[in-house]
Image (cartoon, rainbow, N blue to C red):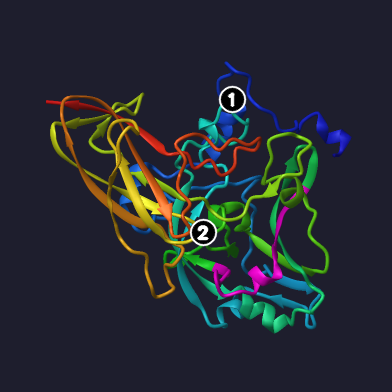
Amino acid sequence: MDTALSGISAPGRLAAEDEDIGAEELALAARNHGLPLEALRYGVTPAGLHYVLVHYDIPAADPGTWRLTVGGRVDRPLSLDLAALRALPAVTRRVTMECAGNGRARLLPRPVSQPWLVEGVGTADWTGVPLRTVLAEAGVRAEAVEAVFTGADHGVERGVEQDYARSLPVAVAAGTEPEVLLAYAMNGGPLPPQHGFPLRLVVPGWYGMAHVKWLRDITLSDVPFEGFQQALAYRYRRDPEDPGEPVTLIAPRALMVPPGFPDFMSRLRVVRAGPVPLEGRAWSGHGPVTRVELSCDGGRTWTDAAVEPGARDGRSSRAWQAWHGVWRAAPGRYVLMARATDATGRTQPLGQAWNRGGFGNNAVQRVPVLCRR
């Protein structure tokens, strides 16, 4: 840690027992917006509704001078402009992306950081070049073990001045399942500035910290990357001294489109008595979702919802799946819940999955509802 910066960049901490969300967290929440849950109705999230997490500033990018460099343990170092990338065979993949900190604000004790509830998610059609195509052109040497991806966003975190950078094992970077993309388009249009213009990484099935935005350099390394965002941040740890386990694949989650209509401040939902359609989306980075269960009594009893199968053409293999059911509501107050199970047998927990960074908390969503006559 740079001692000159330590006074302005505090270490990570947990909120005190009765501590409310403070001004710094509110400022982060204003910059990093989530998905309005009613927008779960869209199979593809409009770009302006897709969640956004920006660690530092959105960097200025001149597409005329921008270059992607590829170097390190390669046979042929590359410097590619956008025209060169667009000249390569392109693919489009529908990918659900979720922030690793989604659900953090619901943890007790609360890690002080971006205060996500459950809205840090979105699904887009990303178009670009398979990363393995560019790596093959560069010629990855046998001694390379990781590919390090560096973005143009620069800042300070916990006293460390840095460019945002993350790595992937070479087997993942050059693999086909999932097929990692160098994406230059989103939902058929250019990447918006907040989503990484002019180029970003898309790593299907992995939490959002792996999808490096404003990508400018790929370096193949023969040793594991020890940068801040890899070795210190984005690790599951319960104690400060614990080295922890790295955050990688997305844990299963189901989210419900809030039924009825809301109270402005409390967001309590109001419905009329009778059949109430329930719908939402479910996803997992470990495999397709095979089951979604619904509870209308706070988790005492559960019934199965109908789950649409995932796409089989490869374009949408890491995208969320729609689910739906019907609740026959009678007057009263209720807590609705939905939980997902994926093909590997992983199921959402009813309670929190606590860790100091607030990562991967996929506890079941709870939706308070008032049913009127």
* Residue 233 image-quadrant placement: top right
Q: CA distance from mark 2 to mark 1?
A: 36 Å
Number of residue marks: 2
Q: Position of residue 104 (x, y in %)?
A: 55, 36
In what element is the residue under mark 2? loop
- Res. 286 mark: 2
Amino acid bearing label 2: His
Mark with earlier residue (2, 1): 1
State the extent of the magenta-drawn residues as a range: 162-183
Q: Residue at x 58, y 36 (%)?
A: 114
In what element is the residue under mark 1? helix
* Viewer-proximal residue among 265 and 279: 279
Q: Nearer the viewer, mark 2 or mark 1?
A: 2
Residue 257 visible somewhere in the drawing: no
Residue 151 visible somewhere in the drawing: yes
346 horizontally vs 73: left or right: left
Q: Is residue 80 magenta?
A: no
Q: Which residue is mark 1?
A: 23
* Residue 139 image-quadrant placement: bottom right
Rate crowding at label 1 as few (under 14), some (14 to 19) or many (20 or more) other CA atoms within 10 Å.
few
* Viewer-proximal residue among 68 and 98: 98
- Location of the C terminus by quadrant is top left
- Res. 137 mark: none
As drawn, 351 above or below 188: above
As drawn, 72 above or below 298: below
* Viewer-proximal residue among 343 and 90: 343
